[in-house]
Structure formats: structure tokens, C-alpha cells
Amino acid sequence: MLVTLKAGEKAVIKDISGANALVRRRLLDLGITEGSIVCIKCILPFGGPVMIESCGQCIGIRRNEASYIEVEKE
């Protein structure tokens, strides 16, 4: 899961089908699909979002939604 990674780690997205439809659509619009490499920029404190970078873009995803995104460490 995406939330199990630490800041600075890279991973390949394996499955986004478990995430909310709006989150999936947002990721697809930004070019982040299954097979994309993402880097965890930071995990904000107090239950804040997970900041990821992929395709030269940095986006924030709620921790709850990030827990549904399956990844494999690179």
C-alpha cells in the first residue's frame, strides 16, 4: 500500500482499482496509471495527506485513499 512507504522511497503502482472513482479519475488525468513510478515526497503529520511525485508533478492524496493504492517497492 502507498501509505506504508516512507519519504524518499520509490514504488511502482500495481493497482488503483480499490481507490475512490474520483481519485482514480484524478490520477488518470495526471498520467498516473498502473505501472507508473511514484516517489513519496512527504507524509504530512496529524493524519494529513501523502504527497507523491510522478511524471514531474507533485500531488496530495488523502491517507485513507492512499491505503487503497497497491504499490511494489522499486
Image (spheres, rainbow, N blue to C red):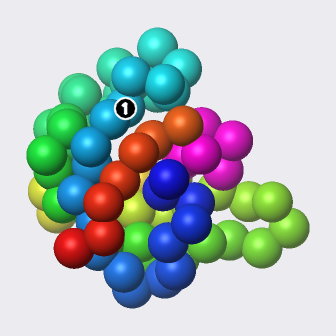
- Whether residue 11 is situated above or below residue 21 in the rendered picture: below
Q: Which type of secondary structure does the marked residue at label 1 adopt?
A: loop
Residue 42 visible (yes or no): yes
Q: Residue at x 27, y 43 (%)?
A: 14
Q: Is residue 54 left or right of residue 68?
A: left
What amino acid is at disc 1? Ile
| Residue 12 percent coordinates (x, y) | 23, 58
| Residue 34 percent coordinates (x, y) | 19, 38
Total label count? Answer: 1
Residue 54 visible (yes or no): no
| Residue 28 percent coordinates (x, y) | 24, 28
Q: Residue at x 57, y 60 (%)?
A: 3
Query: Which image quarter: residue 37?
Result: bottom left
Residue furthest toward the top? 21
Q: Is residue 6 left or right of residue 47?
A: left
| Residue with the mark numbered 1 | 16
Q: Residue at x 30, y 70 (%)?
A: 73
Does residue 41 belong to the magenta stretch? no
Q: Is residue 5 left or right of residue 28?
A: right
Residue furthest toward the bottom? 8
Does residue 63 belong to the magenta stretch? yes
Query: Which image quarter: residue 74?
Result: bottom left
Residue furthest toward the front? 72
At label 1, counting other C-alpha atoms closer than 10 Å, the crowd grade (few under 14, some 14-19, many 20 or more) is many
Q: Which residues are magenta?
A: 61-67
| Residue 19 percent coordinates (x, y) | 50, 27
